[in-house]
Amino acid sequence: MKKSLKYKIVLAIVIIVCIMDMSFIFVNYVNYMNVNRNYTDSLAQTVANTCRLVVDGDSVTDYLDNRRRNTAYYEVWNKLIDYRNTSENVLQISVVNFRDGGGCYVYDTDLTENGAFLGDIRPYDEVQNAIKDELIACEKIEPLEYNGRSDYYIPLNSSYNIPVAYIIVGISTENVRREQLTYLGYITSIVTSITVLFGVFMIWFMQHNVLGPLNAMSKAASSYSIAILRDGKESPISRMNIRTGDELERLCESMKKMEHDIIASSSQLAIADWNSNHDSMTQLYNKRHYKEQLKELQNDCTIGVIYFDIDNLKRMNDTFGHEKGDAVILKAAEFIRRYLTEQARGFRIGGDEFVMLIRDCTEEKVQELVSTMRGDEKGNLSDVTAEFYCRLAIGGAFRKTAETLEETIKRADDEMYKNKHSVRKA
């Protein structure tokens, strides 16, 4: 027995709606779980970073050696307890050094009878015993999962950058799990209601012979992502011309307005993103973006740094006014911009200070570039007078083995000051 077209359409819509319903619920629930996991990770990392500000790795080593508590020890302990109390999801903060016999505690914020004191050694539990070697080596590990909690192990280093212990942050997962179950029920009811209404709506339209206009809208929407307003051309949505005089026509007009709003919002977002990362005067990257780049480049061993300083800028401002001083700053930015490449980025990090970070370079390349810049006459930023003139003092450094990026920047800064003073003497 042949099925009618109406039956096939209704069946297809029901199947599609059910698939959409389950897929949307699944995707949203997974995303929600990821968001909660990211929140838990971020909370633990934030607590650990805060603890690093007060827990000194060298002092931890001393406490492990002599097992003596002093005033400084109790001050740190009280601060750790305060950090634990900042969130109900933070269950415990401990500082532990692991060895063959178990974990030797330095600090523990558990004030119950189960808490540990300085020098207490607790044997490995089943979860810890599975990664005993990593714990003894104080390596970076994934969070350890227990019933109702996750323990994050963040290595604590001494002043010689040697791991001496773990900062262990216990985060409760009970609240997160309850929220996940509540969210699952909520999203299931909402999405199911929406998809059922959507299915009924679609069936009603099919019954009123709107397959043609609907197909046109579907084709326009499917090609929207690859044909939206490029080279001044109209998008498929803007070219739709549905004149049915009913909800379908209004839906078409609403889609056109939505497209217009999305384009306008995207443009504003792009401008805002640019402004947040660039200096308004020079259009070079600003200090905020500079700090972000330093975090990204911490493990990059092929980094060159060139440090710039506008010599005598203050005297220029005091003598001729800030308008002349601003002109000097713009000349400095233009000078730096001439040497920027895909690997080299320029940053304005202060009123008269600039930095260039160069990826994938060599020490010879840095020295050659510094020499070229110092010999460039455009580095003289103002007319030479009997009293003074403004010029760019330039210093460079290439990251050495086992050297932090901050130390490399400091060497470049020192080289810049040497260049500044040598030119002044000359």
Image: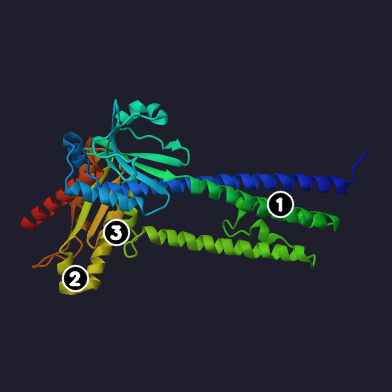
The residue labelled by disc 1 is 219
The quarter holding residue 365 reads top left
Circle 2 crowding by C-alpha within 10 Å: few under 14, some 14–19, many from 20? some
Q: Residue beneath label 3, please?
A: 334
> Callout 3, which amino acid?
Glu
Residue under the point 52% across and 60% down = 266
* Camera-nearest label, 3 or 2: 2
Nearer the observer: mark 3 or 1; the answer is 1
Q: What residue is shown at x 90% (from left), y 45% (from top)? A: 4
**Residue on which the image places disc 2:** 317
Considering only vertical position in the picture, is 316 above or below 276? below
Quadrant of residue 8 within the rendered picture: top right
Left or right, 257 with respect to 325, comes to right
Q: Is residue 369 visible?
A: yes
- The answer to whether one can see residue 342 in this image is no
Percent of width and height locating residue 226: 61, 50
* Crowd tier of the residue under label 1, counting other residues whose Cα lies within 10 Å: few below 14, some 14–19, many 20 or above: few
Nearer the N terminus, badge 1 or badge 2? 1
Decide: marks 3, 2 in contact (CB < 8 A)?
A: no
